[in-house]
Image (spheres, grey):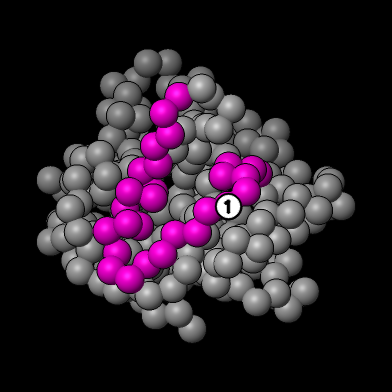
Amino acid sequence: MKIGLFIPCFMNELYPEACVSTLKVLKNLNLDVEYPLDQTCCGQAMANGGCSNEVENLAHKFVDIFKKYDYIVAPTGSCVAMVKDHYAPFFNDDPAYNKVKTSIYEICEFLHDIIDVKEFDVEFSHKVGLHNSCHAHRNLNLATPSELNKTYNSKLKNLLKKVKGLELVDLQREDECCGFGGTFSVSEPAISTAMGKDRINDHINSGAVVMTGVDMSCLMHMEGLINRDNNPIKVMHITQILAGEKLS
């Protein structure tokens, strides 16, 4: 299979180490990965701001770049959900978009459902708390939402349990929003901050020394609050753990 790696624009600029870890995870599994250099933003930020014309241009650029790949993999739930759930109005049942829509995966979803990884040959001997970001959780179904009366399953926890030495802690609220929400954190900063602090405190009170998740945007929001309050907890994207990166 030929894999096209999509990296969110803000991760490319602010969290290059998590981007490199994403590539490392795929390469460690001997997968054939390309990173198209002409890729850019998926358009989610513009969509949140109501700029539909700009989103349409970016949507067509995205599809043109990635339609040739068997799979498209990205280290983010929200951008993948953007492509899968919000591009359709711009394509009028275009076969190229339909192919992209069914080929794009958040990396953990890809590792769990497509590759079916049995074990990661890495060690991470720390207590870890998992933050379930909203788009990945409910749009991509990476775990069972707590409000549903169903047997619980988490693709993310299933993968983390394959890392040697890692101990997952139990949170009081498994899938509560961090309060980031893109433009929500700008328009409602007080509520956003309170939600983020609640999420952080749940992890700290549960004994986690590392908070992880699949959406660096959520982790970025909470990392800012952690650093401002000098909280005793670190933030790492899940690919950094799966790639065997050390806790700094």
Q: Main secondary structure of the magenta part?
A: loop
Question: Based on the displayed image, in which of its 4 quarters is residue 16 positioned?
Answer: bottom left
Residue 82 can be seen, yes or no: no
Q: Out of 44 and 163, give the one closest to the viewer.
A: 163
Which residue is outermost to the top?
92
Relative horizontal placement of residue 67, taking residue 219 as reference (left or right): left
Look at the picture and state if 230 lies above or below 238: below
The boundaries of the magenta stretch are 150-177
Which residue is outermost to the right?
190
**Element carrying mark 1:** loop
Q: Position of residue 141 (x, y in %)?
A: 43, 33
Look at the picture and state if 119 lies above or below 124: above
Relative horizontal placement of residue 158, taking residue 233 as reference (left or right): left
Relative horizontal placement of residue 107, taking residue 214 as reference (left or right): left
Magenta stretch holds residue 176: yes
Q: Quadrant of the N terminus?
A: top left
Which amino acid, by three-letter code, is at mark 1?
Answer: Leu
Magenta stretch holds residue 77: no
Residue at 44 percent across and 73 percent down: it is: 126
Look at the picture and state if 66 lies above or below 150: below
Pointer 1 residue: 171
Q: Out of 97 and 191, give the one closest to the viewer.
A: 191
Q: Position of residue 137 (x, y in %)?
A: 50, 38
Question: Based on the displayed image, in which of its 4 quarters is residue 34 positioned?
Answer: bottom left
Circle 1: is it few (<14), some (14-19), or many (20+) Cα within 10 Å?
some
Residue at 55 percent across and 67 percent down: it is: 208
Q: Position of residue 92 (x, y in %)?
A: 42, 16
Q: Out of 26 and 38, give the one closest to the viewer.
A: 26
